[in-house]
Amino acid sequence: EVQLVESGGGLVKPGGSLRLSCAASGFTFSNYMMNWVRQAPGKELEWVSSINSISNYIYYADSVKGRFTISRDNAKNSLYLQMNTLRAEDTAVYYCARAFGDYWGQGTLVTVSS
Amino acid sequence: DVQMTQSPSSLSASVGDRVTITCQASQDISNYLNWYQQKPGKAPKLLIYDASNLETGVSSRFSGSGSGTDFTFTISSLQPEDIAIYYCQQDDNLPYTFGQGTKLEIK
């Protein structure tokens, strides 16, 4: 069974940092592009960042470019999102998603507030 | 980025009704169009991929059609458990953009 489990969310002050993790199981992690998608409270889904299977292609939405860094460790079946210089508008549930979105984690809430 | 325009933004229908949601892409995306269902507090769930293919385990009352720029999602007979927000998504080009969602309610 495919499972994606996010962790690392929480409350952080504007300008602060957080590192999200996504632990994958039930499939060959190293074969798949992986992604972070977020959803602000009551809002639609926003594709944030993608990384291909061997980490040589990375995409960032303009809204996070220069502040967020996606990475993966195929030996540990894990995906990461380092989030720096956080802003109030980054407040959202962050989901880890496989490939185009065939499987999603349960999400982790990031709240940026003073 | 490919813009996805979904309509209507909300819809109220009765149990047993046929429900249709449309999605229009800002450019030709062939059949790279997916439909998701999201219930409160939950992650999106894939229902339809590649415009018309039913994901394994999903009820056959859900269906999709279309290609190019115009797509349709249909629930053949609305059930109470179908109350959710439905999103279209293109996966032709990164970022894999979503429509703004259709909130489906029971009349």
Image (tube, rainbow, N blue to C red):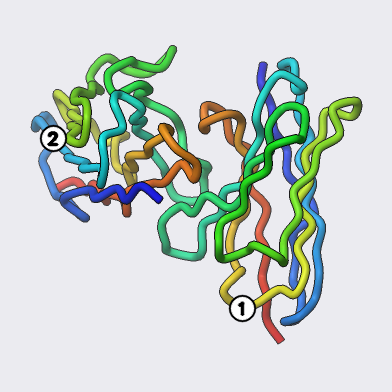
Q: CA distance from mark 1 to mark 2?
A: 37 Å
Q: Quadrant of residue B54?
A: top left
Q: Quadrant of residue B30?
A: top left
Please name the residue shown 33% across and 46% down the image: B85
Q: Quadrant of residue B27?
A: top left
> Mark 1 falls within which chain?
A
Could you say where residue A59 lies in the image, as x and y percent from the top left? 62, 47
Q: Nearer the viewer, residue A12 or B3?
A: B3
Q: Quick one: SS at disc 1?
A: helix
Q: Is residue A47 rendered to the left or right of residue B68?
A: right
> Mark 2 falls within which chain?
B
Graded by Cα atoms within 10 Å as few (under 14), some (14 to 19) or many (20 or more), the crowding at tag 1 reads some
- Amino acid type, label 1: Ala
| Depicted B94 relative to depicted B74: above or below | below
Residue that carries the numbered disc 2 in the rendered image: B19
Please name the residue shown 9% across and 30% down the image: B18
Residue that carries the numbered disc 1 in the rendered image: A88
Q: Is residue A59 rendered to the left or right of residue A66?
A: left
